[in-house]
Amino acid sequence: MSKKTMIRPYGDTSGDGKIQLSFSLPVPPDAFGKEAARLLLKSIGFEEIEICGVRDLREGYTHFIAYAVTSAFVDPANIKVKVVETPVMDMEATDAYIRENIGREVTVVGACIESDAHTVGIDAIMNMKGYNHRYGLERYQWFNAINLGAQVPSEELLRRARAENADVILVSQVVTQKNIHIKNLTRLIELAEAEQLRDKMLFICGGPRISHELAIELGYDAGFGTGTYSTDVASFIAITLAGRKIDKQINR
């Protein structure tokens, strides 16, 4: 493969390899600290290093912004990524699809589980007003959307989902320090399996560090990260549930 088809960082001109970096070091904001930052980047393999931003973080820490050049590149042929492949419909089209292919309301129970108190993600998907000109599931005619809010124990989420005879459990995880989101999501699936609920409902997770690939690895049906909206989630739910309904009819 020729160099022209390789993917390289773009700064001033196409493929020049220039990249901006932002990082902090336990050094003072002086000439010593700047040299430490430069040598660190040099040891990684960067060239033409310029330390152009220095900010004192107090207590012996400094934040740096640097520009540098890398010779690294990515071969597009080596890029493999798992994504949700269902087509995305708007609200009206999704409602019509559910009416024609499922024929009843779809019940979704959502929450931010365990210690996560950040509802911005779950609210963007479920609340009536939605986000960025896309209404949430509460606005859809053929969704029964139940948003339990934040800091909901996994046991309570499963109990409510069972009580509501839910079709879908939707989980948001915004807090990710020390990979707590992975621990929480894994525990929820383990509890669902123990209560024999895993195969009775769709399990969907979302958050800034959630990818579809990670969600599948953790045992979920789908994962939605940054840049996805209620329309993405609603379309996936409708199409997947309709497909499962057809499969059940065929296997009777």
Image (cartoon, grey):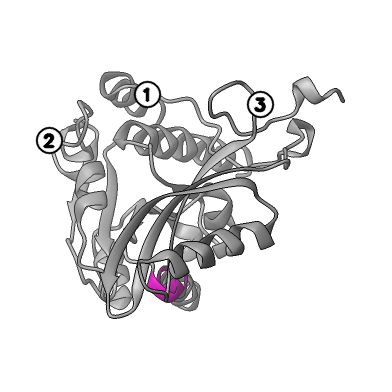
Amino acid at circle 3: Gly
Task: Decide: is 212 above or below 96.
Answer: below
Q: Which residues are magenta?
A: 177-182
Of mark 1 and mark 3, the one earlier in the sequence is 3
Q: Position of residue 106 (x, y in %)?
A: 30, 42
Of residues 18 and 164, the one nearer the viewer is 18
The local crowd at label 3, few if under 14, some if 14 to 19, many if 20 or more residues have their Cα within 10 Å, is some
CA–CA distance in space, label 2 to label 3: 42 Å
The residue mark sitting in front, 1 or 3, is: 3
Q: Quadrant where the C terminus lies?
A: top right
For label 3, the residue is 15
Q: Position of residue 126 (x, y in %)?
A: 22, 44
Please tell me whether mark 1 sits on a helix, a strand or a loop.
helix
**Magenta segment includes 178:** yes
Residue at image location 36% in from the left, 52% down from the top = 168
Please tell me whether mark 3 sits on a helix, a strand or a loop.
loop
Of residues 103 and 186, the one nearer the viewer is 186
Task: Decide: is 33 above or below 135.
Answer: below
Q: Position of residue 140 (x, y in %)?
A: 20, 32
For residue 7, side relative to residue 115 (left or right): right
Of mark 2 and mark 3, the one earlier in the sequence is 3
For residue 238, side relative to residue 142 (left or right): right
